[in-house]
Image: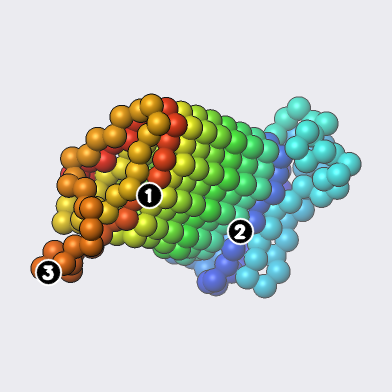
Amino acid sequence: MLEHTFQTPLPVTLEVSIPSGDIEVETDGADETSVTVDGDERMLEHVEVHHSGNRVSVTLREKGKLGFFGSIFNGGLRVQARVPHGASVRVKTASADTELQGHFGALEVSSASGDVRLRGELVDDATIKTVSGDVELERVDGDLSVQCVSGDIRARAVAGSVDTKSVSGDIRLDALTTGSVRFTSVSGDIEIGIAQGSLLDVDAGSTSGDLSSEVPLASEPVTGEGAAAPTVVLRGRTVSGDVRVFRAG
């Protein structure tokens, strides 16, 4: 097992680059970052944990020799980190699951099959690319961009704009207040919740699926008193999935 602790007053970014396993990150009110790495002893020999400036990195060196996306080792690594509130996180992995809990800055994840789950909030943007992993986010105060092939995407609350692309996974956005939403899907269903008091400007459809909305669809810009209300601009297409817009509770 590897254990490291660094003094890291904000702003700080944690970067984790491992082929497989589990990545668990929590935030607290301290001004330090602690990292623990456990797993196959042969893999631990090649793990590097560094602190440079406002960046703490966990990497598996000699990636070309070990084969980052096809490691010669059967086991994975478990990375556990505790970072200050507001820290940003960047992850690159083939199949490791990423679990975050607390209050973060920005989030960037590139994964082939690992799941991504956030229990807490991001005050900045989230950018996630995965092939078959599921994405579940509790709250994003910035913009959200997700690309996924067969995994499901769910975000409970997004304050900024949203751009999602999926082939066969479902997309659900529970509560949107304002901003633009763009989606593209082949066979997954789309569910989008519009917060109470927000208006909807929509141009969306499905080739063979159904389109339904509990929120009135605006066909032209809103004027008068209603123009002051926040508006969600929805644009997207799906081939065979259904599109449903509902009023968030």
Left or right of 207: which side holds 90? right
**Percent position of residue 52, x then y:** 71, 69
For marks 1 and 2, the one nearer the N-term is: 2
Q: Secondary structure at mark 2?
A: strand
For marks 3 and 1, the one nearer the N-term is: 3
* Residue type indicated by callout 3: Gly
Choose top left, top right, bottom left or bottom right for residue 207.
Answer: top left
Residue 157 visible: no
Residue at 70%, 65% in the rendered image: 51
Q: Are marks 1 and 2 in contact (CB under 8 Å)?
A: no
Residue 105 visible: yes
**Percent position of residue 93, x then y:** 66, 43
Question: Could you say which disc has been placed on residue 224 in the image?
Answer: 3
* Residue type indicated by callout 1: Arg
**Percent position of residue 103, x then y:** 42, 58
Question: Could you say which disc has been placed on residue 14 in the image?
Answer: 2
